């Protein structure tokens, strides 16, 4: 999963760890927000993950890889299972 909102350039291992931490916190935030708004926790988690995945895919289609590479805004691909 690739989260475009953060625009974190990942050049070193430390930055990758920070990005994974930010991503986990963002996913937790979405889950808590959905639950506070009255959503079923299992459905909220499913929708949060789906939302991030869709956003990531759209971003990849809207911005070519070469352009992201030139701007130093490549993202670390992370699956939900890797975050657990």
Image (cartoon, helix red, strand yellow):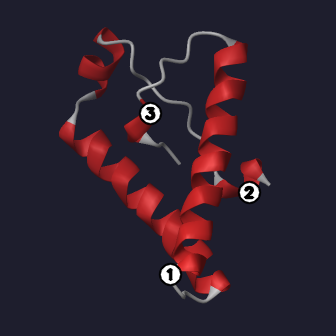
Residue depicted at x 75% and y 48%: 82
Q: Earlier in the sequence, mark 1 or mark 2?
A: 1
Image vertical order of residue 41 relative to residue 62, above or below: below
Query: Residue 6: which disc?
Result: 3
Among the 4 quarters of the image, the one containing residue 41: bottom right
Residue 58 position in % (x across, y down): 28, 51
- Residue lying furthest left in this view? 62
Classify mark 1: helix, strand or loop. loop
Q: Earlier in the sequence, mark 2 or mark 3?
A: 3
Q: Earlier in the sequence, mark 1 or mark 3?
A: 3
Q: CA distance from mark 2 to mark 3?
A: 20 Å
Question: Tag count in the figure?
Answer: 3
The residue labelled by disc 1 is 37
Q: CA distance from mark 1 to mark 3?
A: 24 Å
- Disc 1 versus disc 2: nearer the observer: 1
The residue labelled by disc 2 is 81
| Within-10-Å neighbours for mark 3: few <14, some 14–19, many 20+ | few
Residue 47 position in % (x across, y down): 50, 74
Classify mark 3: helix, strand or loop. helix
Residue 12 position in % (x across, y down): 65, 10
Among the 4 quarters of the image, the one containing residue 7: top left
Residue 77 position in % (x across, y down): 56, 38
Image vertical order of residue 25 relative to residue 50, above or below: above
- Disc 1 versus disc 3: nearer the observer: 1
Query: Residue 72: which disc?
Result: none
| Within-10-Å neighbours for mark 2: few <14, some 14–19, many 20+ | few
The answer to whether the residue labelled 1 contacts the one labelled 3, judged by CB atoms less than 8 Å apart, is no
Q: CA distance from mark 1 to mark 2?
A: 25 Å
């Amino acid at each position: 999963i690739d989260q475009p909102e953060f625009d974190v350039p990942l050049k070193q291992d430390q930055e990758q760890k920070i990005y994974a931490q930010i991503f986990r916190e963002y996913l937790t935030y979405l889950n808590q927000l959905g639950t506070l708004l009255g959503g079923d926790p299992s459905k909220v988690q499913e929708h949060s993950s789906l939302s991030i995945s869709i956003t990531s895919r759209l971003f990849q289609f809207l911005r070519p890889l070469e352009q992201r590479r030139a701007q130093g805004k490549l993202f670390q691909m992370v699956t939900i299972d890797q975050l657990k």
